[in-house]
Amino acid sequence: PGSSSVSKGEMADSDDADISTDLIWTRKFCGGLRRDIGRRLVPYYKSDWTDAFKDGNFQKSTACIAFLFFACLSPAITFGAMYENDTKFNLGVSETILASSIAGIIYSLFCGQPLCILGGTGPNLAYTVGFYKLCLMLDVDFLTARVWQGLWCSLFTVILAATDASALMQYCTRFTEDIFSALISVIFIVGAMEQIFDAFSTKETAAALLTACLSFGTYLLAVTLRDLKKTKWITSGLRYTISNFAVSLAIITNSVIAHAFPKDVDIDWLAAPDKLEPSFQVGSAARPWIINPFGGQGLNPDRVIRPLPTWAIFAAILPGIGMALLNYLDQNLTSLLINRPSSARKKPAGYHLDMMVLGALIYPIVSVLGLPFPCAATVRSVAHQNALTTFEDKPIQGGGTQRIATKVIETRWTAFAIHMLMAFTTLVGPLLRNIPKGVLFGVFLYMGISSMPGNQFFERFYLWGIWSTADYPQYDYVVRLQIKRVHLFTAIQAVCFIILYFLKDSKDTSVGFPFFIAALIVLRRFFGRIFTEEELEELDGHDLAPKPSKDADPEKADVETQSGARALEEKVYASEEKAQPELEEPRTPEVVDSSLRPSEEEKDALPRTKASL
């Protein structure tokens, strides 16, 4: 797909399947969007659905759906409770669940990177609460004004998609990605531990101890069952099955254990809703799902029927732009983490297409329905990708192992199924309420710790605890660089990580979290004054991205192989013809231009058949 000619700012057809060219400037209106549709959506759409059911992937995909259903539902309920408290029930649990469901289903159908999971985020929550307070101060209906905020946000998101704005993410390097990934892991771990410790201050001793035991028991059982495939126990097929469903089995087992204790042990249980209805009440009934953008529905604290002032429609432009920029950063930073070269993906990404799906399809719907604005949720997206990835532990000289992704199931089916299940949460509400919150804390602990291997920042930070350099694992950067230079790079990352964590941890400053991530990208541009090019290549460079394989798109791979072979053959013929002396006039043979003569590697790449030269 695409033009066969090469112009400035564009790539040739041969580069369209190369995942290292996901982020380029096309310098054309909707150029990146059209390129994403031509190189990602259309060629791979069928395989995006079928890959989940072939080559032994069905079991792993099903286990991923069961695991991520709980991993997505619990944050939706948590964010919903926070919205209820901070917006006085203008938004709540029903709205967050429905927003995640609708957005996730639409996104899985049309997006460019289906491994991303949409949902609520901390910065989005903080920004929405700020807009709610602004509406109270200006005495306008929050939900009505928010429709216009959402529509303006949709417009500017479409503009960002049409102008290749996501290509700016090409300047984000591993330095920023590793900090961002480390932050997500720590947030999950610290968040789970805070909930466990909080039980000791709010619950009786027996309930607090049971909560802690359920949390750590779920984590340990999930890890044990996951690693069962590395042992020789039972049959290989049964080991593989148990390992795939490790988290789900740990949830079920510990939930059953919790029910064995007396009812007077007052632990917290998952608060699944009985029905999906708007949280805001107008009189004795819930507000209508469809919000009139011009008011007249009494959506204010006094329930006064009044129109939305005309000036408020245009005043919502600035908050709409802010929300668009916030979601742009959240969405693209998460996508960048999912699409990093070490992920073992074979299919191209679709950054611009993802933004267009958000702006043109999702945001208008959630605006009119009065739902939170979803975007790619980093924690859930990384957990989704890891659940579909096959990892191998590579031993390292000097001790330790390095986790390497060898295969990832790139499918739309899992995200679609997860969010379809969330849409029918109320049907299984009574069943979900039998799951203790302590069990879900253990799941969060599992998600945080399991995402740490493979992060180079953690690897280098671990070296600080080894006082003898002779005992360091022999990573490439340890062997090739001075250790003090490695530690300096790690120290800079650690300072940035700490600042980022406190920004994210505070509700008042969390809205600035994505913008600080963007500032890290700018900061990295000045590292050439501190580190040499060789040092940055080792410490901040990615491994080479895997080349597209025949498994990803057999027809395209075959065509590219054949065209490459033909090009090499033509090069050989050209050199042979130029080197061949004429028979009529014998003369001293001419010296062959070395640029026309194929290299030994090119000769080896030619097909070894009788039809070859």
Image: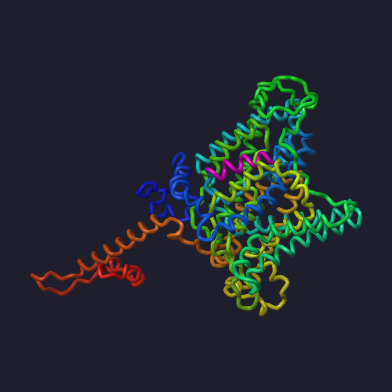
Does 340 appear in magenta? no
Q: Nearer the viewer, residue 590 or 346?
A: 346
Does 108 appear in magenta? yes
Can residue 391 be seen at all in this image of the molecule? yes
Seen at 80% across and 59% down, the residue is 257
Q: Nearer the viewer, residue 246 or 110?
A: 246
- Number of marks drawn: 0
Indicate the position of residue 336 as horizontal and vertical percent values: 57, 53
Q: Residue 600's image quarter?
A: bottom left
Identity of the residue furthest to the bottom in this view: 470
Indicate the position of residue 69 as horizontal and vertical percent values: 67, 50
Q: Main secondary structure of the magenta part?
A: helix
Indicate the position of residue 595 as horizontal and vertical percent values: 30, 66
Can residue 481 be seen at all in this image of the molecule? no
Q: Which residues are magenta?
A: 97-109
Image position of 343 (left or right of 457):
left
Which colour style is shown?
rainbow
Establish if 367 lies above or below 228.
above
Seen at 73% across and 72% down, the residue is 465
Identity of the residue furthest to the left in this view: 584
Image position of 315 (left or right of 167):
right
Establish if 95 lies above or below 519.
above
Indicate the position of residue 81 as horizontal and vertical percent values: 77, 42
Image quarter where the C terminus lies is bottom left
Establish if 76 lies above or below 294.
below
Image position of 345 (left or right of 143):
left
Q: Nearer the viewer, residue 15 or 444?
A: 444
